[in-house]
Amino acid sequence: MRVLRGRVFYRGRVEPLDVGVDEAGKIAAIRKVIAGEEVEDHGDRLILPGGVDLHVHFRDPGLTEKEDFPSGTRSAALGGVTTVADMPNTRPPVTTRDALREKEARVRGRAAVDYALYAAPRTGASVPELSEAAAFKVYMAESTGGLQVGEGALGEILEAAAPRKKLVVAHAEDARRFQKDEAATLAGHSRARPKESEVDAIRTLAKLRGDGPVHVAHVTCVEALDAVPEGVTTEATPHHLLLDHTRPLKAFGKVNPPLRSPEDRQALWDAFAAGRIDIVATDHAPHTREEKEEPFGEAPSGLPGVATSLPLLLRQVRAETLSLERFVDATAARPAEILGVPKGRIEVGRDADLIVIDAREVVRITPRRVRYKCGWTPFEGMEGVFPRTVYLRGERVVEDGEPIAEGLGRRLSGNEA
Ligand code: DOR
Ligand code: ZN
């Protein structure tokens, strides 16, 4: 057994502990002192569970000028995310069993962290053939990829997914509320796809949901949260929590659903910090600089964020605007639970996916730091705390903040823990 020593987040508090890791990369013991062969002593640094990001777009296959599995998972690792769930709006889209199997074969052995794959059923009838996907994504309005489904199909998909206990993640915007807005600004984009479109879509979802697990992606405002029925889980992105439509980002801040006003952002943050939102997920959705430099109306929507989510939020923990418990819950424990993977907590029997943090090491975020293939980040210039060391099932994948191992990531089937 190998032993990792440090100040460990265990059962809701931080204490100096030894974490024993077995050959299979599982946590085998947690004690004050484990007399092991090899001790890796992290001193007074914090040891936390690795992040679980349920919403990334790694663009592989078909859109790999924006990102690919090796680059996306490398950025995830250096930001402390050890599990990702990848969205189906690739080219071809993951709407059939063949497309899912091809994607699976293509990404195998090329991921630096563990991963789950989504499929996007377009009809209730396609649900059984997509059962190998870890979870389903449904788009209730057009965003990148043209995978939206109407109410009839949505109802059928929810009904077919429920007995399989398959998680259905909804992109909840109702296009009937969209408006033309020619302002060519982020505020205009928010008016064009207003908060009411989210509220209406969530109401539709509440009406159709049945009794399977349903999750609402990227909630941007408290009004949307208020419409979420009991038992449906929610996520917020770091960009909706930390950026608003007054930032001078131009189309580099264009995303669906849009960045909202400073007041909406603050209210969303308060709800998140108070525990009203289950998880943080990044909706990491890179586009190239050239695409984002097109005239505002033509530029595609989507922002990269997988490497900066934990660092930005750890900065908030250090500033005491977010509790460490809430941080761990939202970035690791709850998303692992929602997807059903044996991760997200430092507990005997779980995978030893761990990050080592020194909260004094605050750095400025730069495109170089995050290593995205697209070469930009909307959080440039903001402060973050990046992990020094990252373990994936007990193996070091990041050392001194640099990715050092590739290809160790394994596929997760979901619904297993
Ligand atoms: O802004 C967005 N970009 N929203 C989405 O729903 C999709 C994403 C993308 O894939 O680019
Ligand atoms: Zn997305």
Image (cartoon, grey):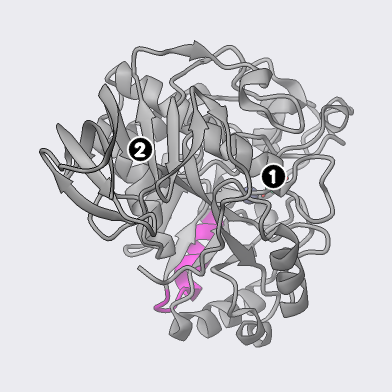
Number of residues whose C-alpha sits closer than 10 Å to that of mark 1, classed few (under 14), some (14–19) or many (20 or more): many
Nearest the camera: 328 or 250?
328
Indicate which disc, 1 or 2, sits on the residue closer to the N terminus: 1
Q: Is residue 232 above or below residue 123?
A: above
Q: How many marks?
A: 2
- The answer to which image quadrant residue 163 occupies is bottom left
Q: Which residue was labeled with disc 1?
A: 70
**Residue 272 badge:** 2
Left or right: 128 in relation to 89: left
**Where is 218 relative to 357, above or below?**
below
Question: Viewer-proximal residue, 219 or 334?
Answer: 334
The spot of residue 365 in percent (x, y) is 57, 17
Residue type for callout 1: Pro
Q: Nearer the viewer, residue 7 or 62?
A: 7
Where is residue 255 drawn, in percent x and y? 68, 37
Q: Which residues are magenta?
A: 200-212
Q: Which residue is depicted at the point 39% across and 31% down?
A: 269
Q: Is residue 361 placed above or below 282 in the rendered structure?
A: above
Image-based side of 35 in relation to 380, left or right: left
- Which secondary structure dominates the residues rendered in magenta? helix
| In the image, residue 205 lies in the stretch drawn in magenta | yes
Q: Is residue 224 visible?
A: no
